[in-house]
Image (cartoon, coloured by chain):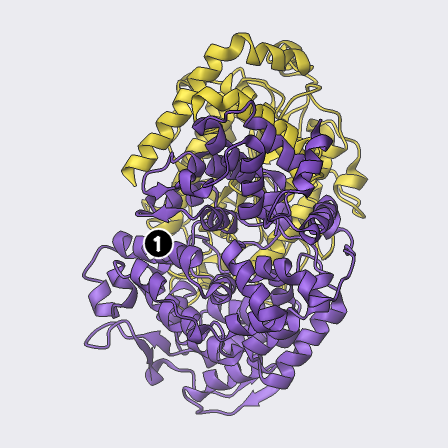
Amino acid sequence: MTSEASSGCSEYQELSRRHFLQAGTGLAAFLAAHAWVPRVAYAKSHRGGARDVIVSIYLRGAADGLTLCVPYADNAYYSSRPTIAIPRPDTADPNRCTALDARFGLCPAMASLLPAYQDGKLLFVHATGSMDPSRSHFEAQRFMETGKPGDQSIGTGWLGRHLSTVGAMIPGAPLRGVGIAAGLQKALVGGPDTLPISNLDAFGITGPGTTLNARRAALTDLYNPTPDPLHSAALSTLTTIDMLNTINFTGYTPANGAVYPGNSGFPYAMKTTAALIRAEVGVEAVAIDVGSWDTHDNQGTITGSMANLMSTLSQTLAAFYRDVVAGNGPNVTVVVMSEFGRRLLENGNLGTDHGHGNVMMVLGQCVGGGRVMTQWPGLEPQNLFEGRDLQVTIDYRDILSEIVQDRLGNNNLASVFPEYTPTMRGVFTC
Amino acid sequence: MAYERYGSVLEAPGVSRRALLGAGALAAAFATAAKAQQATVHVVADTDPTSLLEKLVDRVTFGATQAELTLARSLGYEGYLEYHLDHLAIDDSACDAATAHLTTIGQPYLQLITQTSGFVRNELIEHCILRAAFSKRQLFERMVEFWTDHFNIDIETAQYYKTIDDRTVVRAFALSTFPQLLTASAHSPAMLYYLNNDVSTAGNPNENYARELMELHTLDVSGGYTQTDVQEVARCLTGWQIQLSGSTRGNFRYNNNQHDQGIKHVLGTTIPANGGQSDGDTVLSLLSTHPSTARFIAFKLCRHFLGYTVAPSVVNRVAAVYTATGGDIKALIRETLRPQHLAAASPKLKRPFHHFISAIRALGTTITSTTATRNRLNEAGHLPYAWQTPDGYPDKLDHWSKNVLVRWNWGASVATNGLSGITFDDATFFSGATTADERADRINERLFLGRMPLPERNRVRDYMLPNPVTQTRWRDAVGLAIGSPSFQWY
């Protein structure tokens, strides 16, 4: 395993260098053929008025919103979760949450997000999600990602339709949407110039270096006449290889001393995404998944599996906040969501089963944060969805619609979220 | 110029007129594949089974080879299908020998756990790769693929148990009956552990397995169960656990002390109190005989063999066979692969595993280590047993169609002997072929059974010009063919 891994790596590195060496011919020709030029066209788009890049983070497996953002003022939360609840902020318990307001608190494993919250750039939305009652991970994820819950036939995703109904930020950009994944996430399906790329720093053609250009030419000819989906995938891939080769991911230094908690998985995905966004090459939408939130047993809200997941999540988001949002990077909106919440009542295995309402997070320069937006339905039995779960009182599409319209500059909400009339709830201040 | 060459191809020995006509049909089918999800594609329906032999070989194997086609031609459509359905009659001793070094594959649990989980996992993945590539029981292996996804278990979670599950559930019953397979899965420690049923007890039922049992394994998400059914099924299965100590450690264990003995109601059926272990048996019986299960299994089998969109009438026919035969898997496959169904089937995109294996098969590659293959599969997001969630690797065009780079790189590396442990003997492959045209014909014959669309064939040929061809160029050309649009479909 070691030999292949190392030889594969050096192969890529060699390719990267070779591409730089060939920049005089290959890259110049490529740039001449494509109307996009890194940095120049986009340089004045910082801050005011510019369209944001969206980073959409999906917590797969139904993250427990009652732990991510603790409803400490509800006695039912404590009576329903005798062993896994996070203690109130006004206790002496070392594991207590930190009050976000008079009702909600941030649990210890999420504490890294307090600075962004206190800066007013991080918003929690509670008792939100999809109105569809499905408790199936896979159906609920599909419904959320298509942007049309309940529709079994719609084939495209909300981010894909957003990209296809708005002009490119940088005309001719090779890559407008990217999923940090080996297979394209449903949310991005239908997006023009959109690819799944599991590692932005290892996207190159292998094989003998001496024939690389000849093989590229052959691949171009082979895929030119073939229909979609392979046609556009192939052409996007070829131009994206060149574009990514202009970015130094390995040597990327985050701004403001931000430190990502690791060089693999979600932290690495966010770090390389930051480098990609800061390179201003026309990427408009990034989808990133974080898995393993399906905590049916030994949930570990203080220490254990969910605490570990939350630590990585919050530390990474905090680093991204320092690096890109609070730094001098392009305008970015980050949204975090999950398919549904978990049951109020803990089960017999120190875990929770599938529930309904959940929490979302929105992070960005223009976010009116520092608060928990909610129409809190309460956790008493008569307030629960189907007698068991937190209700959904804010449709997740209200939040996404506001992002799409106000920050992504797309007024075609009827295309992005078909047959839905959103309620704009004032997520943003600019 | 390209079309002057076309003439020479027509007269090339070994390329039959029918194969060329077939190439046209295949190219046309590829051209319409993009629309496969939006509308049913009507490929010219030719129900003469003889003309469908190449297509049948494509669908029942992990990649057509000349040897398989020769076999299919000698046995005929039905004979070839029956040959593969009677998988135990196929002498697979060569593949057995090629996998004999994988000592953990047949070991009992107590022996497995004396080794590191990583070693045991890698042996299981290597076993999967080698069987898919080199077993003569190709249809069986494609059904192992199908059921491995259907009853997906993440090996990072289940660890040693997955080796047992592969042996005693998936491979034991892949061509048996669905109720037998379902029952075996419900008793599998890997599944019970993966979906938390091992800790589901009276008074504290865990719903995880109960829900996926109905949603993913039997009824389908819209198959007519409610949240109450999920909770009731969970109660029925309380006490279905794993033996954690003693000489039977790692085996299924029914723990009556932790079984909920109360009355239950599942899908409209009352299950009386004090049923003990039979409560779970009743649930499995209710589910495996449910019409929604018949339809769901039929639908998935049709998608597996026929394409992303299959006429509802075909699914209904297969579902009817499920009901009539009690879920006999061979009977379901026979019905699914009836010539008229296959004739109307639209092309499917090879998933990365299928694509990689089909290249290995077409090239006659020898493998002394699967390390490089495992790494590349991991990079492609398709390492066996590594999908985390219980829905299994997607069988969907959208998920896989945008990641072409891993396919190009597999071709580029495997054809140029760029991966340690994998050897492509290009001298033998091209034996007797010297010019660029002859070599392009050889590639067409071996990788496409003569059906490579001419523009693609000619572009690969042109890559090898001028004559005389260099080794780097002819190896590259094979890699390009593996990465070419038509090699992505089957």
Residue of label 1? B126
Of the pair A99 and B190, the residue shown nearer to us: B190
Of the pair A253 and B403, the residue shown nearer to us: B403
A136 lies above or below B3: below
Q: Which quadrant holds the C terminus of chain A? A: top right
**Residue shown at 65% from the left, 67% from the top:** B299
Q: Residue placed farthest to the top in the image?
A: A24
B4 lies above or below A98: above
Total labels: the figure holds 1
**Residue shown at 64% from the left, 36% from the top:** B456
Q: Is residue A410 left or right of residue A240?
A: right
Percent of width and height locating residue B377: 44, 45
Percent of width and height locating residue B104: 26, 62
Q: Which quadrant holds the N terminus of chain A? A: top left
A173 lies above or below B45: above
**Residue shown at 69% from the left, 67% from the top:** B49
Secondary structure category for the residue under label 1: helix
B470 lies above or below A384: above
Q: Quadrant of residue A401?
A: top right
Any part of residue A403 in sight: no
Percent of width and height locating residue B98: 31, 58
Percent of width and height locating residue B389: 48, 56
What is the drawing colour of chain A?
yellow
Of the pair B303 and A68, the residue shown nearer to us: B303
The three-letter code of the residue at mark 1 reads Glu
Q: Which chain is purple?
A: B
Any part of residue B92 in sight: yes
Q: Is residue A50 left or right of residue A253?
A: right
Q: Few, some or many C-alpha atoms within 10 Å of disc 1 (few <14, some 14-19, many ≥20)?
A: many
